[in-house]
Amino acid sequence: MPDKKKIMEKISNLSSIPTLPSIIVQITSLLQSPKTSAEELGRAIASDQALAAKVLKLVNSAFYGFPGRISTITHAIVILGFSTIKNVVLTASILDIFKKKSDNITDFDIEQFWMHSIACGAAAKSIARFTDNKKKEECFIAGLIHDVGKILLYQYLPELFMKTYSFSIQNKLLFYQSELQLFKITHQEIGGTLAERWNLPQMLQQAIKYHHAPQPAQECFSTTSIVHCADILVRALDFGYGGDDQLPNISETAWKSLNMDSIQTSTLFDMISNEIDRATAFIQLF
């Protein structure tokens, strides 16, 4: 059975693991300049026709509230703003990288896994709205890609994925508990390594790396706490499938830090359900 060191060596040596498209690097660079115009940013995105089509498809979905009204990338930037468009591009790119099924795994429902991921993103956005967090779009992305380490295992190290998955089901454990028992490493750390390689924003890196155990000392504790709670709430609401049949305990520290005790649970659940209905637009990217 491979240990943590051997698994990380395998991941480091996987030359086939994709990098984020160069367009992401270009867009990030453009957004760092206060002189960048909507037209200039629009031209950069439009230079990748497939990406531009996905961006327009998403911004015209019910998720953003402008169905069928946005005809160009520049128009989308003017209406939604630079930050939101950057998040849309990043989301579309990451989902595109990991949209294929593993040829070596037939016993795992990857469509329901992505449904769980999308639901987690929608729930994170709802919690951010409830708690007056200004980075609602970033929370959506953090929730959407929090389990990117599982997908890396699923596509590139399927034997390890299936050992963990089978062990979880047989022993009624959470996926990450099985990883710890079998390999002394979890998808959080694996996903965090990938997020660092991609140079994703720090809050996304932190949410991926610590979503099962947010701690106040962590740099982006608020976002990580939101994703942590969102992950468990969508499991409780039975949206999609996260890779095991167990319901984790919500961290009392994370819950209280978000002042969630003051929220009427039924209202929050209704908002999450509505947000998930809107977020199903992302399923079209698969």
Image (cartoon, rainbow, N blue to C red):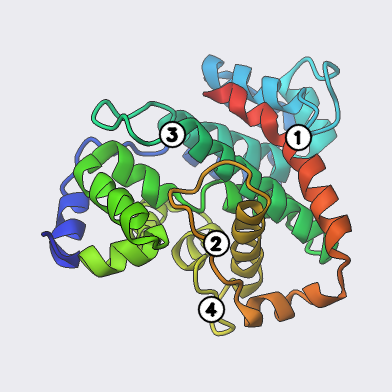
Does residue 196 sit above or below 262 in this rendering?
above
Q: Earlier in the sequence, mark 3 or mark 2?
A: 3
Q: Are marks 3 and 2 in contact (CB under 8 Å)?
A: no
> Label 2 belongs to which residue?
247
Rate crowding at label 2 as few (under 14), some (14 to 19) or many (20 or more) other CA atoms within 10 Å. some
Pinpoint residue 266: horizontal percent, then vertical percent.
86, 58
Number of the front mark, 4 or 1: 1
**Crowdedness of circle 1 by 10 Å Cα count: few (<14), some, many (20+)?**
some
For disc 3, the neighbor class at 10 Å (few under 14, some 14 to 19, many from 20) is some
Residue appearing at x 72%, y 26% in the figure: 39
State the quadrant of the N terminus.
Answer: bottom left
Which amino acid type corresponds to the residue marked 1 in the rendered image?
A: Asp
Q: Is residue 274 left or right of residue 54?
A: right
Circle 2: residue type: Leu
The mark tally for this picture is 4
Foreground label between 4 and 3: 3
Q: Amino acid at mark 3?
A: Asp
Cα distance, mark 4 to mark 3? 33 Å
Identify the residue position indicated by label 3 in the image: 109
- Amino acid identity at mark 4: Gln
Q: Which mark is residue 269?
A: none
Where disc 4 sits, the SS reads loop
Residue 40 seen: no
Ranked by sequence position, the earlier of labels 2 and 4 is: 4
Q: Which mark sits nearer the N-terminus, 3 or 1?
A: 3
* Separation of marks 3 and 1 at Cα, in angstroms: 20 Å
| Residue on which disc 1 sits | 277
